[in-house]
Amino acid sequence: MLNAPVRSFPPVVGRVATRLILGSMPGVASLMAAQYYAHPQNAFWRIMGELLGFAPDAPYRQRVAALKRAKIALWDVLAACERPGSLDAAIRRHSEVANDIPALLAAHPETTRICFNGATAEAAFRRHHPALVLRADQALVRLPSTSPAHASLRPEQKCAAWRDALRD
């Protein structure tokens, strides 16, 4: 079971998505709950709640609906990989299978900003999609990871970076 592949979730995306947030791969707590960012120490939902005006502990469906209303899509760069535990550093690179992000962007041409939840997501994206040509109105933005494993910034600093990136 140690080498069993873990698989990501389908994208969270509404009819219109001007922003796409990409993580690397859901952690163990998220996989068990079948919810993005389910680890209680992960700051993702606290940040989104502050930015979008919802309770971070609201039912998952309500949090997802708030993202969609804000025209924010959520997915992972990787569709599958081998990773013992939850740390991005434990992802076995040879096992990575990428999600079809170009197809998602083609289906949502209104997407102008692709935001990475941390350096690992950005590196995996660049590794798996090196030929992706962005339009002049599209940008790639690496954000501080919301993972509890990345505590180099204070919560308010992380929130400010996310606010700037998700601003229209």
Image: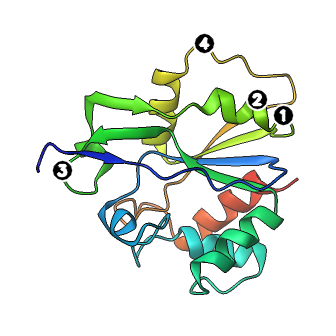
How far apart marks 3 and 1 lie (CA) works out to 36 Å
Measured from the top left, where is residue 53 in percent x and y? Answer: 77, 81
Residue situated in front as seen by the camera: 89 or 65: 65
Measured from the top left, where is residue 57 in percent x and y? Answer: 56, 86
- Judged by depth in the image, the label closer to the viewer, 4 or 1, is 1
State if disc 1 and disc 4 touch (CB < 8 Å): no
Identify which amino acid the numbered label 3 is placed on: Pro
Badge 4 density bin: few <14, some 14–19, many ≥20, Cα 10 Å = few
How far apart marks 4 and 1 lie (CA) works out to 17 Å
Identify which amino acid the numbered label 1 is placed on: Pro
Would you name the residue on which mark 2 appears?
106
How far apart marks 3 and 2 lie (CA) works out to 33 Å
How far apart marks 2 and 1 lie (CA) works out to 6 Å
Residue situated in front as seen by the camera: 91 or 139: 91
Q: Residue at x 42, y 60 (%)?
A: 152
Q: Secondary structure at mark 2?
A: helix
How far apart marks 3 and 4 lie (CA) works out to 30 Å
Q: Which mark is residue 131?
A: 4
Measured from the top left, where is residue 10 in percent x and y? Answer: 55, 50
